[in-house]
Image (cartoon, rainbow, N blue to C red):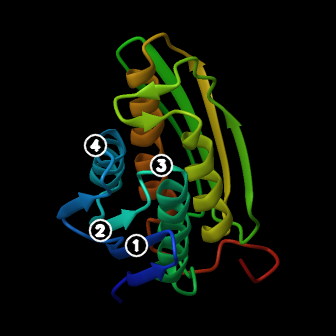
Amino acid sequence: MTRKSEMKRITKETEIALILNLDGERNIDINTGIGFFDHMLNLMAFHAGFDMELNCCGDLYVDGHHLVEDTGIVFGKAFKEALGDKIGINRYSNMYTPMDEALSMVSIDISGRSFLHFNVPLKREKIGDFETELLEEFFRAFSFNAEITLHLNLIYGVNEHHITESVFKGLGRALKEASKLDKEGSLPSTKGIL
C-alpha cells in the first residue's frame, strides 16, 4: 500500500503544488518563497520521514498570510488523503522536543475531528522573513483540513527561532508516530470510524 498524495490549489492569490509520501525516504524539496518557512517545513518533513515536494508562489508583495495559510490547507488535505482508510494507524502521539533551551509538546489524535489548541507565545513580529503571527494560521489550516486534533504547547524557551524549530520538529515526530502502521491492522476506534 502506497500512502501518497498529490494535491494542487490555485486561487487568485496563490498556487500550491504538493507531492507527499508518508512512507518516504526523506526526499525533500520545498520552495515557498519564504526562507524561514522553507527551513521549518524541511525540518518537519525530515523528522516525519516523509518524501515531500512542495512548490508555492503567491502574493508575497502583500504579505505571507495567503501563502502560509494555503500551504497549511494543501498539506492538511494531502495528509488526510495519504492516510487512506486509516486502518492500522497508531492514531495518537505525544512528543516532547527540545531545541537547546526551548522545549515544546505536540499531541496529535488522528480523530476525524478538527481542533487546534495553540499555546506558543512569540514576541517578535518576524523571524527572518516569516511573520510569526502566521505560525498559528498554518497549524490551524493544517489541522482543520487534515481533520486531526492538534495540541501545541510551549513548555519554555527564550530564542524564538529555537521555539519555532522545536514545534515543527515535534510536529514531524508526532505525525510519524501517529500515522505509523501497527501489526494488528485494525481501526483504532471503538466507533468503527475515524
Look at label 2 and name its amino acid: Asn
Residue 70 shows in the view: yes
Q: Residue at x 62, y 49 (%)?
A: 137
Work out whether 15 lies above or below 56. below
Up/down of 53 relative to 49, above or below: below
- Does the CB distance between marks 2 and 4 fall below 8 Å? no
Label 3 or label 1, whichever comes before in sequence order = 1
Q: Which residue is mark 4?
A: 35
Instruction: Tell me the element at label 2.
Output: strand
Left or right, 63 with respect to 20, comes to right
Residue 93's spot in the image, x, y percent?
56, 50
- Can you say whether 126 is above or below 59 in the image? above
Q: Which residue is mark 1?
A: 16
Label 4 vs 1, first from the N-terminus: 1
Quarter of the image with the N terminus is: bottom left
- Pointer 2 with pointer 1, Cβ within 8 A: yes
How far across and how far down the image is residue 103, in percent? 49, 21
Q: Earlier in the sequence, mark 2 or mark 4?
A: 4
Q: Position of residue 107 (x, y in %)?
A: 62, 44
The picture quadrant where one finds residue 159 is: top left
Crowding near the residue tagged with mark 1, few <14, some 14–19, many ≥20 C-alpha atoms within 10 Å:
many
